[in-house]
Amino acid sequence: MKNRPITYNSDSFLRMKLSYQVFDLPLRHTFTIAHQSRDIQDTLIVTLEDAGFFGIGESTTNPFYGVTIDTMTEALEAFRPVLEDAKTVNPETLWAMGNDYFKGNPFAQCALDMAAWDLFTKRKGQKLYQYLQLNPENIPTTNFTIGIASIEKMVQKMKEVDWPIYKIKLGTHDDLAIVKELRKHTDAVFRIDANCAWTAEEAIRNSEELVKLGVEFMEQPLGKDDLEGMREVYLHSKLPVMADESCIVEEDVKKCHGLFHAINVKLVKAGGITPGLRMIQEAKRLGMKTMVGCMTESSVGISAIAHIAPLLDYVDMDGAMLLAKDPADGVKISPEKVTFPERNGIGVVLV
């Protein structure tokens, strides 16, 4: 794992100090989904310092969304003068102040927002879940993701990590055969994620077999703009369907109502914890199930998800479990529970 420090120019800090580092996160296995493969994940870890306290946040790069280290740091630098002259550390206020600066770059805004929540709750002398008045005993068990590979390799990945819930990445010409073979090796609950790879006809037809194979729900079977197709899937699928690529920002939640049974909120795509909480609340108001998902993040991003996980019906926070080496120490996840460190904020330190 390679830590690449970034230099920046700032002669004085009127209030908050912003800094960041780049880490190359090595993966335990090549991670493949329908539209990309990778062995290393670049991630940006942001630090905010104020009055002897510090907060950290994270956002990964993502070629599918055109997010690079350069685009994130450019957005942060544009906001730096406003941030370092800010008279507040309230994360919701900071998020609103930065909204115009981070248009088109929610990943950078997420890292900053996460750091702001960490800083804010540390100054309050509380863990984030305590400030939000959430009970960590109510956290649902995360799934463990099995990326696309040969069937033999996918079986091997399952055997390496014995887990009660697996998310199976699909989007191949042999999707049903993959699920049927994996089912021979475990009684675990399956969730499948086609990453936009199917047609409406395929999704409906596949759902008839997948429900027999112990699949709990299908995530984003169709392309994000195929609304007519999703309406057909919603009406005729034998399985509940969950939005991912179709539900990026707050305005998308209402659009997904009547097309999906549930939404998967990705904090990096939404712009952080602040809008993520609003998206969860809106989905609940509409009677939809909620999930927060992750990228292949370190324990910085995963720990932030864990603190809001008591709000959720499902959670996908296995990103750090997919790494060969983690640059941070935070929550510890087992099938039985999530253990939080005895540190305030999101409870993460770099190691």
Image (cartoon, helix red, strand yellow):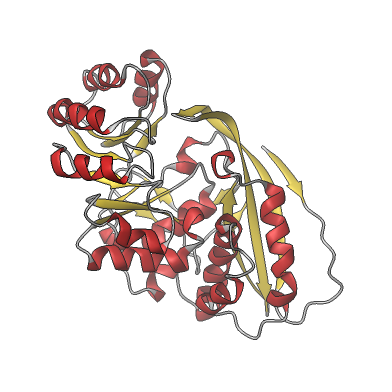
Seen in the picture, residue 301 relative to 14 is either above or below; the reply is: above
Q: Is 3 left or right of 36, judged from the image as shown?
A: right
Residue 315 higher or lower than 346, as above or below: above
Image-based side of 260 in relation to 295, left or right:
left
Residue beneath the point at 31% across and 53% down: 263
Position in image of residue 152 (x %, y %): 37, 13
Q: Is residue 136 visible?
A: no
- The quadrant in which residue 229 appears is top left
Q: How many marks?
A: 0
**Residue occupying the point 16% across, 37% down:** 237
Q: Quadrant of the N terminus?
A: top right
Query: Residue 42 location in percent, x, y?
Result: 63, 41
Residue that lies at the very extreme toward the front in this rendered image: 228
Which residue is located at x 39 percent, y 67 percent?
Answer: 277
Q: Is residue 163 above or below residue 314?
A: above
Q: Nearer the viewer, residue 115 or 230?
A: 230
Residue 256, percent from left and from top:
30, 55
Q: Is there any visible trace of residue 292 in the rendered image?
A: yes
